[in-house]
Image: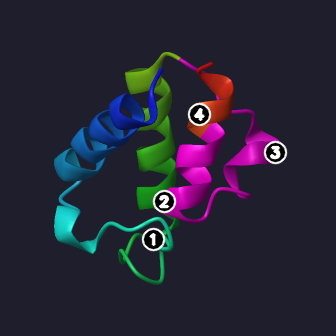
Amino acid sequence: MTLTQINNRLQDVLATMGVSLTALSDQANFTRDLGLDSLDVTDLLVQVEASFGIRIPDEDWWTLQTIGQLKDYLSYVTL
């Protein structure tokens, strides 16, 4: 999967959660910058798993705190 495909699919997931696409940057922190609480982050990661057809192990969930970290992770697991 290309980085463009990952970006587009991730933007779709975030848009369905009501996150403004103008707020998205690789440095955007889910809680601090995007205003997501822990339940929102959990919902985001569940939706990402469904959208990308992957399973994110529990130990990886809390290491993913920014858009850039999530993109890097998705780039790695969707090779």
Q: Does residue 63 belong to the magenta stretch?
A: yes
Name the mark nearer the viewer: 2 or 4. 4
In front: 40, or 1? 1
Instruction: Say what amino acid the circle numbered 4 marks.
Output: Ser
Residue 78 versus residue 20 in the image, above or below: above
Q: Which residues are the magenta region?
A: 54-73
* 10 Å crowding of disc 3: few (<14), some (14-19), many (20+): few
Q: Does residue 71 belong to the magenta stretch?
A: yes
Q: Give the CA separation, mark 1 to mark 3.
A: 19 Å
Q: Residue under circle 1? A: 37
Cβ atoms at labels 4 and 1 below 8 Å apart:
no
Q: Position of residue 6 (x, y in %)?
A: 41, 34
SS for dot 4: helix
Residue 59: assigned label:
3
Q: Residue under circle 4? A: 75
Q: Can the viewer see residue 20?
A: no
Instruction: Say what amino acid the circle numbered 3 marks.
Output: Glu
Q: Residue 20, located in which quarter of the rendered image?
A: bottom left
**First reached walking from the N terminus: tag 3 or tag 2:** 3
**First reached walking from the N terminus: tag 2 or tag 4:** 2
Name the mark nearer the viewer: 3 or 2. 2
Q: Can the viewer see residue 9?
A: yes
Name the mark nearer the viewer: 3 or 4. 4
**First reached walking from the N terminus: tag 1 or tag 3:** 1
* 10 Å crowding of disc 2: few (<14), some (14-19), many (20+): some
SS for dot 1: loop
Name the mark nearer the viewer: 1 or 3. 3
Q: Give the CA separation, mark 2 to mark 4.
A: 12 Å
Q: Position of residue 64 (x, y in %)?
A: 64, 56
**First reached walking from the N terminus: tag 1 or tag 2:** 1
In front: 43, or 29? 29
